[in-house]
Image (cartoon, rainbow, N blue to C red):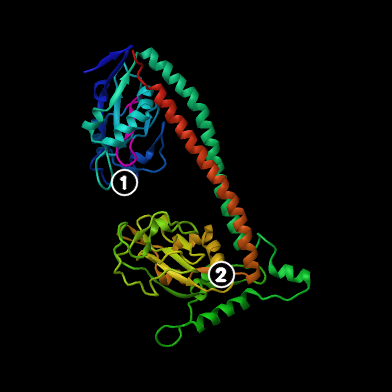
Amino acid sequence: MTVQVNEWRQTSLREVVSKLVDGSHNPPSKQEHGFPMLSARNVEVGRIVFDSYRYIEEAAFKQENNRTRITPGDVLLTIVGTIGRTAVVPAGLAPFALQRSVAVLSPRPELLSKFLCYQLQSPAVQRYFEENARGTAQKGIYLKTLGMTPVVLPPVATQVAVVAELEKQFSRLDEAVANLQRVKANLKRYRASVLKAAVEGRLVETEATQARRQGRIYETGGQFLQRILEERRAKWAGKGRYKEPVEADAACLGVLPEGWVTASLDMISTDSGYGTSQKCGYENDGPAVLRIPNVQHGILDLQDLKFAPSEFNLGQSDAVSSGDLLIIRTNGSKSLIGRAAVVMAGPQRIMSFASYLIRFRLSSADCIPAWVSVVWQTSQMREWIEAHAATSAGQHNVSMTVLAKAVIPIPPAAEQTRIVAEVDRHLSTIREVEAEVGANLQRAQALRQATLAKAFAQPTQ
Protein backbone atom coordinates (compact mmCIF):
# COMPACT_ATOMS: atom_id res chain seq x y z
CA MET A 1 0.00 0.00 0.00
CA THR A 2 1.23 3.50 -0.75
CA VAL A 3 0.58 6.68 1.21
CA GLN A 4 0.36 10.06 -0.55
CA VAL A 5 1.86 13.05 1.26
CA ASN A 6 2.21 16.33 -0.64
CA GLU A 7 2.43 14.38 -3.93
CA TRP A 8 5.31 12.24 -2.63
CA ARG A 9 4.44 8.57 -2.34
CA GLN A 10 6.00 6.21 0.16
CA THR A 11 6.17 2.81 -1.53
CA SER A 12 8.46 -0.18 -2.02
CA LEU A 13 11.09 -0.87 -4.64
CA ARG A 14 9.12 -3.82 -6.05
CA GLU A 15 6.19 -1.50 -6.85
CA VAL A 16 8.26 0.93 -8.95
CA VAL A 17 10.38 -1.44 -11.05
CA SER A 18 9.30 -3.79 -13.81
CA LYS A 19 12.36 -6.01 -13.45
CA LEU A 20 14.23 -7.03 -10.31
CA VAL A 21 16.72 -9.87 -10.89
CA ASP A 22 20.25 -10.73 -9.88
CA GLY A 23 23.15 -12.19 -11.84
CA SER A 24 24.27 -15.79 -12.18
CA HIS A 25 24.41 -17.91 -9.02
CA ASN A 26 26.51 -20.48 -10.88
CA PRO A 27 28.90 -18.52 -13.13
CA PRO A 28 30.02 -20.38 -16.25
CA SER A 29 33.67 -21.36 -16.58
CA LYS A 30 36.14 -18.68 -17.61
CA GLN A 31 37.10 -18.37 -21.26
CA GLU A 32 39.98 -16.65 -23.05
CA HIS A 33 37.51 -14.72 -25.20
CA GLY A 34 33.77 -14.15 -25.36
CA PHE A 35 31.32 -11.93 -23.49
CA PRO A 36 32.22 -10.05 -20.28
CA MET A 37 30.70 -11.22 -17.01
CA LEU A 38 30.90 -8.46 -14.41
CA SER A 39 30.72 -8.63 -10.63
CA ALA A 40 30.26 -6.13 -7.79
CA ARG A 41 33.85 -4.94 -8.18
CA ASN A 42 32.90 -3.55 -11.61
CA VAL A 43 30.14 -1.32 -10.21
CA GLU A 44 31.44 1.85 -8.60
CA VAL A 45 29.31 4.74 -7.37
CA GLY A 46 27.78 6.17 -10.51
CA ARG A 47 29.75 4.20 -13.11
CA ILE A 48 30.47 0.76 -14.52
CA VAL A 49 34.16 -0.13 -14.94
CA PHE A 50 35.53 -2.79 -17.26
CA ASP A 51 38.99 -3.14 -15.69
CA SER A 52 38.89 -6.77 -14.53
CA TYR A 53 36.34 -9.46 -15.37
CA ARG A 54 35.89 -12.97 -16.71
CA TYR A 55 34.82 -13.94 -20.22
CA ILE A 56 32.06 -16.47 -20.86
CA GLU A 57 31.14 -18.27 -24.06
CA GLU A 58 28.26 -17.13 -26.29
CA ALA A 59 25.86 -19.93 -25.34
CA ALA A 60 26.30 -19.16 -21.63
CA PHE A 61 25.84 -15.44 -22.28
CA LYS A 62 22.58 -16.01 -24.16
CA GLN A 63 21.24 -18.07 -21.26
CA GLU A 64 22.15 -15.36 -18.74
CA ASN A 65 20.89 -12.56 -20.98
CA ASN A 66 17.50 -14.22 -21.38
CA ARG A 67 17.05 -13.77 -17.64
CA THR A 68 18.61 -10.38 -16.92
CA ARG A 69 17.94 -8.58 -20.27
CA ILE A 70 20.23 -5.68 -19.36
CA THR A 71 19.30 -2.54 -21.34
CA PRO A 72 20.30 1.15 -21.24
CA GLY A 73 18.54 2.90 -18.37
CA ASP A 74 18.62 -0.13 -16.08
CA VAL A 75 20.09 0.45 -12.63
CA LEU A 76 22.79 -1.90 -11.39
CA LEU A 77 23.00 -2.39 -7.60
CA THR A 78 25.66 -4.34 -5.71
CA ILE A 79 23.93 -6.75 -3.31
CA VAL A 80 26.74 -9.00 -2.02
CA GLY A 81 29.89 -7.96 -0.13
CA THR A 82 30.01 -4.19 -0.45
CA ILE A 83 26.28 -3.57 -0.69
CA GLY A 84 24.64 -0.45 -2.10
CA ARG A 85 26.82 0.83 -4.94
CA THR A 86 24.71 1.85 -7.93
CA ALA A 87 25.16 2.88 -11.55
CA VAL A 88 22.85 3.48 -14.51
CA VAL A 89 23.59 1.42 -17.63
CA PRO A 90 24.45 3.97 -20.34
CA ALA A 91 23.68 3.62 -24.03
CA GLY A 92 26.40 2.21 -26.24
CA LEU A 93 27.89 -0.37 -23.86
CA ALA A 94 28.86 -3.74 -25.33
CA PRO A 95 26.64 -6.60 -24.07
CA PHE A 96 27.64 -8.10 -20.72
CA ALA A 97 26.37 -10.57 -18.11
CA LEU A 98 26.46 -10.35 -14.31
CA GLN A 99 27.39 -12.49 -11.35
CA ARG A 100 25.11 -12.95 -8.33
CA SER A 101 26.65 -9.96 -6.53
CA VAL A 102 24.84 -7.47 -8.77
CA ALA A 103 21.09 -6.90 -9.20
CA VAL A 104 19.40 -5.37 -12.26
CA LEU A 105 16.49 -2.96 -11.75
CA SER A 106 14.31 -1.60 -14.56
CA PRO A 107 12.39 1.50 -13.37
CA ARG A 108 8.77 1.90 -14.47
CA PRO A 109 7.88 4.97 -16.59
CA GLU A 110 6.96 7.04 -13.53
CA LEU A 111 10.47 6.63 -12.06
CA LEU A 112 13.64 8.16 -13.54
CA SER A 113 16.66 5.87 -13.60
CA LYS A 114 18.97 8.50 -12.11
CA PHE A 115 16.48 9.36 -9.39
CA LEU A 116 16.38 5.68 -8.38
CA CYS A 117 20.17 5.39 -8.64
CA TYR A 118 20.70 8.32 -6.28
CA GLN A 119 17.93 7.27 -3.90
CA LEU A 120 19.47 3.82 -3.45
CA GLN A 121 22.66 5.59 -2.30
CA SER A 122 20.78 7.68 0.29
CA PRO A 123 21.41 7.11 4.02
CA ALA A 124 17.89 5.78 4.68
CA VAL A 125 18.14 3.08 2.00
CA GLN A 126 21.73 2.23 2.88
CA ARG A 127 20.61 1.77 6.49
CA TYR A 128 17.88 -0.61 5.30
CA PHE A 129 20.46 -2.66 3.38
CA GLU A 130 22.77 -2.79 6.40
CA GLU A 131 20.01 -3.88 8.78
CA ASN A 132 18.64 -6.55 6.43
CA ALA A 133 21.81 -8.06 4.97
CA ARG A 134 22.27 -11.74 5.78
CA GLY A 135 25.19 -14.16 5.60
CA THR A 136 28.33 -15.16 7.46
CA ALA A 137 31.43 -15.09 5.25
CA GLN A 138 29.88 -12.45 2.98
CA LYS A 139 26.67 -10.61 3.67
CA GLY A 140 24.09 -10.08 0.97
CA ILE A 141 20.55 -8.86 0.31
CA TYR A 142 18.03 -11.44 -0.94
CA LEU A 143 15.79 -10.34 -3.81
CA LYS A 144 12.62 -10.62 -1.74
CA THR A 145 14.13 -8.32 0.91
CA LEU A 146 15.43 -6.01 -1.80
CA GLY A 147 11.95 -5.73 -3.26
CA MET A 148 10.61 -4.49 0.08
CA THR A 149 13.14 -1.64 0.24
CA PRO A 150 11.22 1.56 1.22
CA VAL A 151 11.49 4.27 -1.44
CA VAL A 152 9.81 7.58 -2.12
CA LEU A 153 8.25 8.53 -5.45
CA PRO A 154 7.49 12.20 -6.20
CA PRO A 155 6.08 13.46 -9.52
CA VAL A 156 8.42 13.15 -12.51
CA ALA A 157 8.90 16.92 -12.68
CA THR A 158 10.12 16.89 -9.07
CA GLN A 159 12.44 13.97 -9.85
CA VAL A 160 13.96 15.94 -12.73
CA ALA A 161 14.58 18.92 -10.45
CA VAL A 162 16.11 16.74 -7.69
CA VAL A 163 18.44 14.95 -10.13
CA ALA A 164 19.53 18.26 -11.70
CA GLU A 165 20.36 19.77 -8.30
CA LEU A 166 22.19 16.64 -7.12
CA GLU A 167 24.30 16.53 -10.26
CA LYS A 168 25.18 20.20 -9.86
CA GLN A 169 26.23 19.65 -6.24
CA PHE A 170 28.06 16.38 -6.91
CA SER A 171 29.90 17.78 -9.93
CA ARG A 172 31.77 20.17 -7.65
CA LEU A 173 32.17 17.55 -4.94
CA ASP A 174 33.46 14.92 -7.36
CA GLU A 175 36.02 17.37 -8.73
CA ALA A 176 37.29 18.02 -5.20
CA VAL A 177 37.45 14.29 -4.46
CA ALA A 178 39.32 13.67 -7.74
CA ASN A 179 41.88 16.32 -6.72
CA LEU A 180 42.31 14.66 -3.32
CA GLN A 181 42.77 11.26 -4.97
CA ARG A 182 45.45 12.73 -7.21
CA VAL A 183 47.23 14.06 -4.12
CA LYS A 184 47.09 10.55 -2.61
CA ALA A 185 48.58 9.06 -5.76
CA ASN A 186 51.32 11.69 -5.82
CA LEU A 187 52.14 11.02 -2.18
CA LYS A 188 52.45 7.31 -2.95
CA ARG A 189 54.87 8.04 -5.79
CA TYR A 190 56.79 10.50 -3.60
CA ARG A 191 57.10 7.87 -0.85
CA ALA A 192 58.35 5.27 -3.33
CA SER A 193 60.92 7.70 -4.78
CA VAL A 194 62.23 8.61 -1.30
CA LEU A 195 62.68 4.95 -0.39
CA LYS A 196 64.29 4.15 -3.75
CA ALA A 197 66.74 7.03 -3.37
CA ALA A 198 67.52 5.85 0.16
CA VAL A 199 68.60 2.33 -0.84
CA GLU A 200 70.51 3.59 -3.88
CA GLY A 201 72.64 6.00 -1.87
CA ARG A 202 71.12 9.16 -3.38
CA LEU A 203 69.15 10.55 -0.44
CA VAL A 204 72.07 11.85 1.65
CA GLU A 205 75.75 12.37 1.04
CA THR A 206 77.55 9.03 1.16
CA GLU A 207 80.00 8.32 3.94
CA ALA A 208 82.75 7.79 1.34
CA THR A 209 82.21 11.26 -0.16
CA GLN A 210 81.96 12.90 3.25
CA ALA A 211 85.11 11.18 4.55
CA ARG A 212 87.04 12.17 1.44
CA ARG A 213 85.97 15.79 1.79
CA GLN A 214 86.90 15.81 5.47
CA GLY A 215 90.18 14.00 4.90
CA ARG A 216 89.43 11.05 7.20
CA ILE A 217 89.07 7.30 7.00
CA TYR A 218 85.76 5.53 7.62
CA GLU A 219 84.37 2.08 8.32
CA THR A 220 83.00 0.67 5.08
CA GLY A 221 79.80 -1.31 4.76
CA GLY A 222 81.92 -4.44 4.30
CA GLN A 223 83.76 -3.83 7.57
CA PHE A 224 80.47 -3.10 9.30
CA LEU A 225 79.01 -6.35 7.95
CA GLN A 226 82.05 -8.22 9.23
CA ARG A 227 81.32 -6.89 12.73
CA ILE A 228 77.76 -8.15 12.42
CA LEU A 229 78.90 -11.60 11.31
CA GLU A 230 81.27 -11.80 14.25
CA GLU A 231 78.39 -10.87 16.56
CA ARG A 232 76.22 -13.55 14.95
CA ARG A 233 78.92 -16.15 15.44
CA ALA A 234 79.44 -15.11 19.07
CA LYS A 235 75.70 -15.36 19.80
CA TRP A 236 75.28 -18.79 18.19
CA ALA A 237 73.30 -20.92 20.60
CA GLY A 238 72.01 -23.63 18.29
CA LYS A 239 72.75 -27.30 18.38
CA GLY A 240 75.99 -28.54 16.87
CA ARG A 241 78.55 -26.46 15.05
CA TYR A 242 77.98 -22.85 14.02
CA LYS A 243 76.10 -22.57 10.73
CA GLU A 244 77.42 -20.10 8.21
CA PRO A 245 74.71 -17.72 6.90
CA VAL A 246 73.30 -18.22 3.42
CA GLU A 247 74.44 -15.95 0.62
CA ALA A 248 72.22 -13.28 -0.88
CA ASP A 249 70.25 -13.95 -4.06
CA ALA A 250 73.00 -13.41 -6.66
CA ALA A 251 70.48 -12.40 -9.33
CA CYS A 252 69.72 -9.24 -7.35
CA LEU A 253 73.30 -8.03 -7.05
CA GLY A 254 73.81 -4.67 -8.75
CA VAL A 255 76.12 -1.66 -8.70
CA LEU A 256 76.33 -0.24 -5.18
CA PRO A 257 77.55 3.18 -4.01
CA GLU A 258 81.15 3.41 -2.84
CA GLY A 259 81.57 1.93 0.62
CA TRP A 260 78.41 -0.22 0.43
CA VAL A 261 78.17 -4.01 0.37
CA THR A 262 75.39 -6.53 -0.20
CA ALA A 263 74.27 -9.00 2.47
CA SER A 264 71.54 -11.59 2.81
CA LEU A 265 68.88 -11.19 5.47
CA ASP A 266 70.32 -14.29 7.12
CA MET A 267 73.71 -12.58 7.49
CA ILE A 268 72.31 -9.70 9.55
CA SER A 269 70.02 -11.75 11.78
CA THR A 270 70.87 -13.98 14.71
CA ASP A 271 67.78 -16.18 14.75
CA SER A 272 64.67 -16.97 12.71
CA GLY A 273 61.55 -19.04 13.17
CA TYR A 274 57.81 -19.46 12.72
CA GLY A 275 55.26 -18.24 15.25
CA THR A 276 52.90 -20.10 17.54
CA SER A 277 49.82 -22.01 16.39
CA GLN A 278 48.24 -21.44 19.80
CA LYS A 279 44.59 -20.44 19.39
CA CYS A 280 44.01 -16.90 20.59
CA GLY A 281 41.00 -14.67 21.23
CA TYR A 282 39.92 -11.26 22.47
CA GLU A 283 38.72 -12.57 25.84
CA ASN A 284 41.85 -14.51 26.87
CA ASP A 285 44.15 -13.08 29.52
CA GLY A 286 47.51 -14.49 28.39
CA PRO A 287 50.23 -12.78 26.32
CA ALA A 288 49.23 -10.82 23.20
CA VAL A 289 49.72 -12.67 19.90
CA LEU A 290 50.61 -10.50 16.90
CA ARG A 291 48.70 -11.38 13.72
CA ILE A 292 48.50 -10.22 10.10
CA PRO A 293 46.38 -7.08 10.89
CA ASN A 294 49.09 -5.95 13.32
CA VAL A 295 51.80 -6.02 10.64
CA GLN A 296 51.57 -2.85 8.60
CA HIS A 297 54.08 -1.29 6.21
CA GLY A 298 57.18 -1.01 8.36
CA ILE A 299 55.43 -0.59 11.72
CA LEU A 300 53.35 -2.56 14.20
CA ASP A 301 49.72 -1.56 14.69
CA LEU A 302 48.63 -2.64 18.18
CA GLN A 303 45.02 -1.40 17.94
CA ASP A 304 43.56 -4.87 17.33
CA LEU A 305 45.19 -7.44 19.60
CA LYS A 306 44.19 -10.99 20.41
CA PHE A 307 45.55 -12.96 23.37
CA ALA A 308 46.65 -16.49 24.16
CA PRO A 309 45.20 -18.38 27.13
CA SER A 310 46.83 -17.61 30.49
CA GLU A 311 48.33 -21.12 30.60
CA PHE A 312 50.25 -20.53 27.36
CA ASN A 313 53.92 -21.16 28.14
CA LEU A 314 55.76 -18.36 26.33
CA GLY A 315 59.37 -19.34 25.73
CA GLN A 316 62.22 -17.12 24.57
CA SER A 317 61.85 -18.37 20.99
CA ASP A 318 58.17 -17.34 20.97
CA ALA A 319 58.56 -13.88 22.52
CA VAL A 320 58.76 -10.67 20.49
CA SER A 321 61.54 -8.26 21.35
CA SER A 322 63.22 -5.13 20.02
CA GLY A 323 64.95 -5.66 16.67
CA ASP A 324 62.59 -8.40 15.48
CA LEU A 325 61.50 -8.34 11.84
CA LEU A 326 58.03 -9.92 11.50
CA ILE A 327 57.06 -10.99 7.98
CA ILE A 328 53.71 -12.28 6.71
CA ARG A 329 54.47 -15.64 5.11
CA THR A 330 51.09 -16.94 3.92
CA ASN A 331 47.73 -15.49 2.89
CA GLY A 332 45.06 -15.70 0.23
CA SER A 333 46.03 -12.23 -0.99
CA LYS A 334 49.38 -12.02 -2.77
CA SER A 335 49.69 -8.33 -1.91
CA LEU A 336 50.01 -9.23 1.79
CA ILE A 337 52.76 -11.81 1.37
CA GLY A 338 56.09 -10.46 2.56
CA ARG A 339 54.63 -7.38 4.23
CA ALA A 340 56.71 -6.75 7.32
CA ALA A 341 57.19 -4.64 10.41
CA VAL A 342 60.23 -4.13 12.60
CA VAL A 343 59.85 -3.95 16.37
CA MET A 344 61.79 -0.73 16.94
CA ALA A 345 61.48 -0.56 20.74
CA GLY A 346 61.01 -3.04 23.53
CA PRO A 347 57.32 -4.06 23.71
CA GLN A 348 55.42 -2.56 26.64
CA ARG A 349 53.71 -5.91 27.19
CA ILE A 350 54.65 -9.55 26.70
CA MET A 351 53.85 -10.53 23.12
CA SER A 352 54.19 -13.54 20.85
CA PHE A 353 53.43 -13.93 17.14
CA ALA A 354 51.18 -16.22 15.12
CA SER A 355 52.25 -19.12 12.93
CA TYR A 356 51.54 -17.32 9.65
CA LEU A 357 54.30 -14.86 10.52
CA ILE A 358 58.06 -15.44 10.31
CA ARG A 359 60.39 -13.72 12.74
CA PHE A 360 63.99 -12.76 11.91
CA ARG A 361 65.83 -11.43 14.95
CA LEU A 362 68.04 -8.71 13.53
CA SER A 363 71.51 -7.84 14.70
CA SER A 364 71.52 -5.17 17.36
CA ALA A 365 74.55 -3.48 15.80
CA ASP A 366 74.00 0.26 15.34
CA CYS A 367 70.78 1.00 13.42
CA ILE A 368 70.37 -2.24 11.43
CA PRO A 369 66.69 -2.76 12.46
CA ALA A 370 65.72 0.76 11.36
CA TRP A 371 67.70 0.37 8.14
CA VAL A 372 66.10 -2.99 7.29
CA SER A 373 62.68 -1.41 7.87
CA VAL A 374 63.53 1.17 5.18
CA VAL A 375 64.82 -1.46 2.73
CA TRP A 376 61.79 -3.69 3.24
CA GLN A 377 59.35 -0.94 2.28
CA THR A 378 60.88 -0.34 -1.16
CA SER A 379 59.25 -1.35 -4.44
CA GLN A 380 62.41 -3.32 -5.28
CA MET A 381 61.89 -5.57 -2.24
CA ARG A 382 58.19 -5.90 -3.07
CA GLU A 383 59.03 -7.08 -6.60
CA TRP A 384 61.60 -9.56 -5.29
CA ILE A 385 59.12 -11.08 -2.84
CA GLU A 386 56.37 -11.43 -5.43
CA ALA A 387 58.81 -13.07 -7.84
CA HIS A 388 59.77 -15.64 -5.18
CA ALA A 389 56.32 -16.31 -3.69
CA ALA A 390 54.70 -19.70 -4.32
CA THR A 391 51.00 -20.45 -4.77
CA SER A 392 49.18 -23.58 -3.68
CA ALA A 393 45.43 -24.24 -3.32
CA GLY A 394 44.65 -20.53 -3.56
CA GLN A 395 47.14 -19.59 -0.83
CA HIS A 396 50.25 -17.54 -1.54
CA ASN A 397 53.31 -18.10 0.60
CA VAL A 398 56.98 -17.33 0.94
CA SER A 399 59.24 -19.58 2.98
CA MET A 400 61.82 -18.77 5.62
CA THR A 401 64.49 -20.38 3.41
CA VAL A 402 63.67 -18.01 0.56
CA LEU A 403 63.45 -14.94 2.78
CA ALA A 404 66.84 -15.71 4.29
CA LYS A 405 68.35 -14.98 0.86
CA ALA A 406 66.68 -11.56 0.52
CA VAL A 407 69.20 -8.92 -0.56
CA ILE A 408 69.92 -6.14 1.93
CA PRO A 409 72.32 -3.37 0.79
CA ILE A 410 74.58 -2.38 3.69
CA PRO A 411 75.95 1.18 3.84
CA PRO A 412 78.46 2.23 6.47
CA ALA A 413 76.83 2.48 9.90
CA ALA A 414 77.08 6.27 10.11
CA GLU A 415 75.50 6.61 6.67
CA GLN A 416 72.67 4.28 7.68
CA THR A 417 71.88 6.57 10.59
CA ARG A 418 71.75 9.65 8.36
CA ILE A 419 69.62 7.93 5.72
CA VAL A 420 67.12 6.60 8.29
CA ALA A 421 66.77 10.07 9.83
CA GLU A 422 66.17 11.65 6.41
CA VAL A 423 63.66 8.97 5.44
CA ASP A 424 61.82 9.51 8.73
CA ARG A 425 61.67 13.24 8.03
CA HIS A 426 60.16 12.71 4.57
CA LEU A 427 57.74 9.98 5.66
CA SER A 428 56.57 12.05 8.61
CA THR A 429 55.60 14.84 6.23
CA ILE A 430 53.87 12.34 3.93
CA ARG A 431 51.89 10.86 6.83
CA GLU A 432 50.73 14.32 7.92
CA VAL A 433 49.50 15.18 4.42
CA GLU A 434 47.90 11.74 4.03
CA ALA A 435 46.02 12.25 7.29
CA GLU A 436 44.71 15.61 6.09
CA VAL A 437 43.71 14.16 2.71
CA GLY A 438 41.95 11.28 4.46
CA ALA A 439 40.05 13.66 6.72
CA ASN A 440 38.95 15.74 3.72
CA LEU A 441 37.80 12.63 1.85
CA GLN A 442 35.72 11.65 4.88
CA ARG A 443 34.23 15.14 5.00
CA ALA A 444 33.38 14.88 1.29
CA GLN A 445 31.63 11.56 1.85
CA ALA A 446 29.72 12.98 4.82
CA LEU A 447 28.66 15.96 2.71
CA ARG A 448 27.51 13.65 -0.07
CA GLN A 449 25.41 11.62 2.37
CA ALA A 450 23.94 14.76 3.95
CA THR A 451 22.99 16.04 0.50
CA LEU A 452 21.32 12.74 -0.41
CA ALA A 453 19.50 12.61 2.92
CA LYS A 454 18.07 16.09 2.33
CA ALA A 455 17.14 15.32 -1.29
CA PHE A 456 15.11 12.24 -0.40
CA ALA A 457 13.54 13.42 2.84
CA GLN A 458 9.80 13.07 2.33
CA PRO A 459 7.98 16.41 2.79
CA THR A 460 5.61 16.58 5.75
CA GLN A 461 2.08 17.92 5.68
Q: Is residue 4 above or below residue 208?
A: above
Q: Is residue 272 visible?
A: yes
Q: Position of residue 161 (x, y in %)?
A: 43, 16
74 in magenta: yes
Q: Position of residue 86 (x, y in %)?
A: 36, 31
Q: Residue at 54% x, 59% y: name it.
A: 378
Task: For marks 2 and 1, give the CA distance.
Answer: 49 Å
Q: Position of residue 176 (x, y in %)?
A: 54, 33
User: Quadrant of the image for the C terminus?
Assistant: top left
Q: Residue at 49% x, 24% y: name it.
A: 169
Q: Position of residue 453 (x, y in %)?
A: 40, 26
Q: Which mark is residue 31?
A: 1
Q: Residue at 26% x, 34% y: name it.
A: 22
Q: Residues within 10 Å of mark 1 (few under 14, many from 20)?
A: few
Q: Residues within 10 Å of mark 2 (few under 14, many from 20)?
A: many
- The residue that label 2 is drawn on is 368
Helix, strand or loop at label 1? It is: loop
